[in-house]
Image: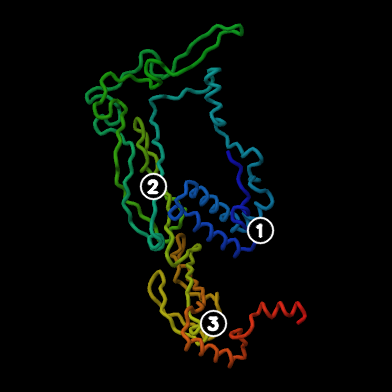
Amino acid sequence: MAEKRDYYEVLGVSKSANDDEIKKAYRKMARQYHPDVNKASDAEDKFKEVKEAYDVLSDSGKRSQYDQFGHIDPNQGMGGGFQGGDFGGFGDIFDMFFGGGGRRDPNAPQRGNDLQYNLTIEFEEAVFGKEIEIKIPRTESCDTCFGSGAKPGTKPETCSVCHGSGQQEVVQNTPFGRMVNRRACSNCGGKGKIIKDKCSTCNGSGQVKKQRTINVHVPAGAYDGAQMRMSGEGEGGLRGGPAGDLYINIRVKPHEYFEREGDDIYLELPITFTQAALGDDIEIPTLHDKVRLKIPAGTQTEHFFRLKGKGVPKLRGVGQGDMHVKVRIVTPKNLSEEQKDLLRQFASLSGEHTQENEQSFFDRMKKAFRGD
């Protein structure tokens, strides 16, 4: 397993970076590596790495723990923490060589496998929610034999070799005594049953491949990277066992104008120098509707306006986030002579000194250093 990179290195920030610097770095890199924007083969892995780093460093408690212990979880210790059970399959090894432990019934019901589905949705669909139909290929219990694998009117027979246990014992004499090895029954393949007349639909497997249409409710406020679990919508179980679950991974496409951070929405609004200096009343878009935004006279570039309740509905709670509008003053290009003359008059009235028709600033700096 590859060693994890330092989270600060992943986001390209120093260990003394504040929350705003971490947010800014995350938003930049998330856009860069989002799988719907970056088609490189490693883009998805890098996107997940960036998100994992941000999830830790944006949480003061997790960040403090990370600064102290790094990637080691202090609650589990250096070994990762055994959680009981059979210690990763050691029980099966002991059974194989020493014949200990309980035997599993090969004919017991078995739960179906879980499935995963990556669902890509539009920015607005994540904000307001949507009902979406998806098609899932999966295995289901055969409708002809009802999962038994046997031809209708017949049923599987108990294996005459292993008597239904699914295992055979092989005794060997060694210098250390008699050794008993246990292995899957060669007659029934470890199933404990023999199907003489197989179902023609599933060929004796008891399962068939089907494409199922599932209705998915994406809740309002869903976010990129969220995971939804749909119980019982995974692979069908064996021998009457329950079906597995379906896990839906949400991917949200970037928006052309808006950026999202939690439940808040950010919009960069370009305005002219005249609007910033004299003030204006501008109609701007939000996720919900169009609103009027009053720009006070003398507004400076990168000033933020807050529109309360114009953000994303809270996924687990009541109310909505806010919308933040950042003003960016656009410098005009390709001015006419009349416009330039008016600006010269403005500069003169303001007591400003321009370099037009005079020696350049760098020429004057050179003379100053030469002592001219």
Q: Is residue 249 left or right of residue 61?
A: left
- Occupied quadrant, residue 252: bottom left
The residue indicated by pointer 1 is 14
Residue name at image x 41 percent, y 62 percent:
127
**Mark toward the start of the polypeptide (3 vs 2):** 2
Residue under label 3 = 299
* Residue 223 pos. (x, y %): 45, 58
Q: Earlier in the sequence, mark 1 or mark 2?
A: 1
Outermost residue toward the left?
Answer: 153
| Residue indicated by mark 2 | 230
| Whole-number angstrom distance, CA of label 1 to CA of label 2 | 41 Å
Q: Nearer the viewer, residue 202 or 367?
A: 367
Label 1 close to label 2 by CB (< 8 Å) = no
Per the rendering, the mark at residue 25 is: none
The residue drawn where x is 31% and y is 36% is: 140
Image quadrant where one finds the N terminus: top right
In the picture, measured across the screen, residue 356 lies left or right of residue 271, that is right
Amino acid type, residue under disc 3 in the picture: Thr
Task: Give the residue furthest to the right.
Answer: 371
114 above or below 25?
Answer: above
Identify the amino acid type marked 1.
Ser
Pointers 3 and 2 in contact (CB under 8 A)?
no
- What is the distance, in whole Å, between disc 1 and disc 3 at their CAs? 32 Å
Give the amino acid type for the residue marked by disc 2 in the picture: Met
Tell me which numbered mark, 1 or 3, is placed earlier along the sequence: 1
Report the residue at 27% width, 24% height from top: 150
